[in-house]
Amino acid sequence: MCSHSSERHGPELDLAGVQVVVRDRAMVQAECVRRKLLCGESGDGDKAVPQDFNLVPEGWGGYVCPWIKAMATAYPCLQEIRLKRMVITDDCLDLIAKSFKNFRVLVLTSCEGFTTDGLAAIAANCRNLRELDLRENEVDDICGHWISQFPDSNTSLVSLNISCLTNEVNLSALERLVSRCPNLQTLRLNRAVPLDGLANLLRAAPQLVELGTGAYTAEMRPEVFSNLAAAFSGCKQLKSLSGFWDVLPSYLPAVYPICSKLTSLNLSYATIQSPDLIKLVSQCVSLQRLWVLDYIEDAGLDVLAASCCPKLQSVLYFCRQMSNAALNTIARNRPNMTRFRLCIIEPKTPDYLTLQPLDAGFGAIVQHCKNLQRLSLSGLLTDRCF
């Protein structure tokens, strides 16, 4: 240890960002109870809320331990806990690990207060764990060997997300864990996982559907490239890619063999310059969702509109400049988009080519995208936009 010393749904409890789902067939059959208590909105993971922009004051509360203690007594058959923007300690994680004997799912989003010692307790004691999802948490990453606490008997993982951790994990222990979980579909690595270790992980889990890479950079060596390209080629089910920290462009073609099948590409952490980004995106002809930074530039958006097939439905784009011409190109070539979210960093920024408001561009989006469900506006606009 790193520390120093055909199923039915049961009652559901939602408490100010805490969602607890109890799965107990006998209880459901006897009571047929569904309880839901709403004390604030936890967010749906795709909504801009103040908490996501560091506007929540420090020490605001959100301590989950009292709820876990109550649940440990009242619901010993608890199988799933999903928390967002809560404070959870190592002691609380240890209580979860030892109180709920058939615990299966732990999802922590934007939480704080715990270390990798707490994760070690979850790994060691939750023998039937199916999902460990750590999303953008503030974790005191004191020991990379916590991953080795998963027992050899644990073969049930379906989803593992460690992307928010900062330090190296025990790569050999991670490889062993991945290789003995035949149903693993989602694997999201942290930045400290080296590129030359990615190929072994892919070979151990060719059934992956969603992958978040670690650091995508290394000294350029032909054997590393060919090894990585072969490993990607073996992942026939891969539909979603993310990660790509610290990209060395020379290694990007290694993912080309699987790009045509990708429906989701998240490059929100990728500092890939426009020419290399254009080459990558042009390979992804089946995209339905793309997350990209402004490195793509107008030229990249033109290629995106021309090369991605009409299945592209959702775009979230953070940038410093935009033009009406680019918005028009997207609108005319992708009329079936359901979500278009543009965030120009500086408020009231005009078309950088003409210095005019972006009325015409956003007007084109609304006019051509008849199935639009979500539209986020930014930049300089007037009341003539729509």
Image (cartoon, helix red, strand yellow):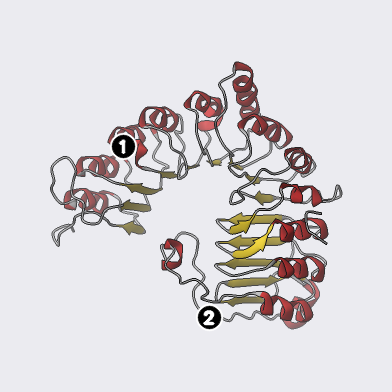
Location of residue 286 with respect to 160 vertically, above or below: above
Q: Which mark is residue 297?
A: 1
Name the residue tied to disc 2.
Answer: 39
Give whichever of 361, 189 is nearer the camera. 189
Q: Amino acid at mark 1?
A: Glu
Q: Residue at x 32, y 51 (%)?
A: 342
Residue that extends furthest to the front in the rendered view of this protein: 4
Among the 4 quarters of the image, the one containing residue 38: bottom right
The reply to whether residue 127 is visible in this rendering is: no
Cα distance in 3D space between marks 1 and 2? 42 Å
Q: Residue at x 23, y 43 (%)?
A: 328
Looking at the image, is mark 1 or mark 2 earlier in the sequence? 2
Give whichever of 296, 20 is nearer the camera. 296
Q: Amino acid at mark 2?
A: Cys
Q: Position of residue 331 (x, y in %)?
A: 27, 45
Q: Position of residue 136 (x, y in %)?
A: 55, 56
| Crowd band around label 2 with a 10 angstrom C-alpha radius: few (<14), some (14–19), many (20+) | few
* Quadrant (top left/top right/bottom left/bottom right) for the C terminus: bottom left
Among the 4 quarters of the image, the one containing residue 371: bottom left
Q: Secondary structure at mark 2?
A: loop
The number of numbered discs placed on residues in the rendered structure image is: 2
Q: In the figure, is residue 316 to the left or right of 378?
A: right
| Crowd band around label 1 with a 10 angstrom C-alpha radius: few (<14), some (14–19), many (20+) | some
Q: Position of residue 3 (x, y in %)?
A: 78, 58
Q: In the figure, is residue 221 to the left or right of 386?
A: right
